[in-house]
Structure formats: C-alpha cells, structure tokens
Amino acid sequence: MTSKSIPKEIQDQVNEIIADFNRKRFGKSGRGYQARFRGRFLYLSRTDWGRPSPICRLTYTGQMDGWEFAIYKYLDEVYDPDEWFFPGADKVDGTVVGAMEAGLKAYLF
C-alpha cells in the first residue's frame, strides 16, 4: 500500500539524486532537472533554455527503486503511464535516475 504523500526524507533523497545527476550531466550550464512533489507524485521538469518543461511523473510506491513512470505527452498535455513507445523507454527502471535518463532520450535538448 502506498502512502498519500511522499515522506520528507524521501523528498530530500530525491532532491540529492537530482542535484548529483545535474552536476554530472549538465555541469554549470544552467540546464537540468527539477522536482515538484504533490501527494504521492514526483513531477520532473527539465530546464534547457531558461524555462522548465515537463518530462515525466513518477508515482511513489514506498520504495526508492520502484517508482511508477508516466511520460509527459505534449500533444495531449497529459502524463501517460501506458505510453511506452518513445526513445529512452528502455532506460525506465523504477529509479529516479532511470526516469531522468529516459527523459534525456525522449526529449532531446
């Protein structure tokens, strides 16, 4: 059973994972991922050219390596958990890093 919201300690861990990923992948370019938490959802956006763009939504399942993934579909302006035909889908592995890697392939910058 999943909780109704992501615990603060998990949010802190996620923010550390994202900061580390951004440092390694983007350096000081001003680009990178950012997190927004709402209930049991983690929304990942990426800033490529000064403006954040939605990439995906992760649903917390109670485990750091068991997030459920939904890609953002710009055409429909929705997060779709059933869409798996996109570049980078093979990177989705239930982790926050896997979701960010998938987002880099799905939405090139």
Image (cartoon, rainbow, N blue to C red):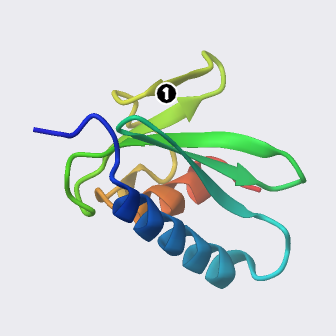
Q: Quadrant of residue 8?
A: bottom left
Please state the horizontal and vertical placement of residue 79, each as a whole percent of the image. 49, 27
Mark 1, Cα crowd under 10 Å, few <14 / some 14-19 / many 20+, is: some
Please state the horizontal and vertical placement of residue 10, each as a whole percent of the image. 36, 61
- For the C terminus, give its image quadrant: bottom right
Q: Tell me if 30 is positioned left or right of 14 in this view.
A: right
Q: Tell me if 15 is positioned left or right of 11 in this view.
A: right
Q: Type of residue at label 1?
A: Tyr
- For the N terminus, give its image quadrant: top left
Please state the horizontal and vertical placement of residue 13, each as a whole percent of the image. 42, 69
From what the image shows, is residue 78 above or below residue 53? above
Q: Residue at x 84, y 68 (%)?
A: 30
Q: Residue furthest top?
A: 76
Q: Residue furthest left?
A: 1
Comparing 24 with 7, the one in front is 7
From what the image shows, is residue 5 above or below residue 82? below
Please state the horizontal and vertical placement of residue 5, each as a whole percent of the image. 33, 40
Q: Quadrant of residue 27?
A: bottom right
Comparing 31 with 109, the one in front is 31
Q: Residue at x 82, y 80 (%)?
A: 28
The residue carrying mark 1 is 79
Q: Residue furthest front?
A: 8
Q: Residue at x 29, y 56 (%)?
A: 94
